[in-house]
Image: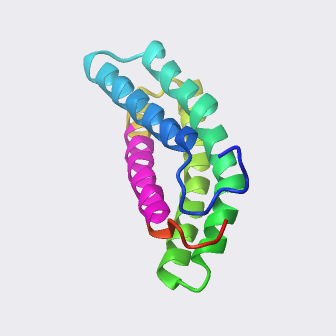
Amino acid sequence: MRDERERPGERPRSWVAAHRRILRSLDRIERGLRSTSGPPVYGSFGRLLRRRVLPHIAEEESQVFPLWRQGAAGNRSEEELLEVLRAEHGRLRELFGSYLSARGARNERHLRALVAEISDLLRAHIRREETLSAALAGKTPR
């Protein structure tokens, strides 16, 4: 993702690796929630969102989405999927804010529900991004 000259459908290793790290972290956190709860697990989840997910979203929006928009031009289904992805980024930011509020209030029931909702959205979102990336592969010249 560092090279802005990349083609819209190309999936830079760093981008794919970031998705894999996020998914592995979600798996670890969800296992932790099944076996225990409390500050250590919720702290790990908050750090994942703050240190990996939100910066990754910002990078996608500034570097990847403009390229994808160019590659999707004229294809309504691809353009619509890109808008869904953009909306999901907004929803993830909103959910992170809710997560921080629930964590501050120490509302474990709400925290568990938010972790589940955010995790489910992230997993589905990553699948959609990778689907669009594959559909756009090679659509624009270098």
58 above or below 8? above
10 above or below 115? below
> How far from the left and from the top, in percent, is residue 142?
67, 65
* Left or right, residue 119 beside residue 84: left
Colour treatment of the image: rainbow
Magenta segment includes 78: no
Which residue is at 58% across, 63% downward? 87
Q: Specify the principal SS of the magenta part.
A: helix
* Left or right, residue 92 beside residue 108: right
> How far from the left and from the top, in percent, is residue 131?
41, 62
Identify the residue at the far left of this view: 35
Work out whether residue 89 or residue 19 is closer to the camera in this orientation and state it: 19
* Left or right, residue 87 beside residue 59: left
* Left or right, residue 77 beside residue 71: left
Work out whether residue 9 or residue 85 is closer to the camera in this orientation and state it: 9
> How far from the left and from the top, in percent, is residue 23?
40, 36
Work out whether residue 3 or residue 55 is closer to the camera in this orientation and state it: 3
Identify the residue at the far front of this view: 142
Which residue is at 45% across, 46% downward? 122
128 above or below 17? below
Which residue is at 58% across, 54% downward? 89
Magenta segment includes 120: yes
Which residue is at 57% across, 75% downward? 72
Total residue callouts: 0
- What span is in magenta? 116-134
Work out whether residue 58 or residue 71 is closer to the camera in this orientation and state it: 71
When asked about the image quadrant of residue 135, the answer is bottom left
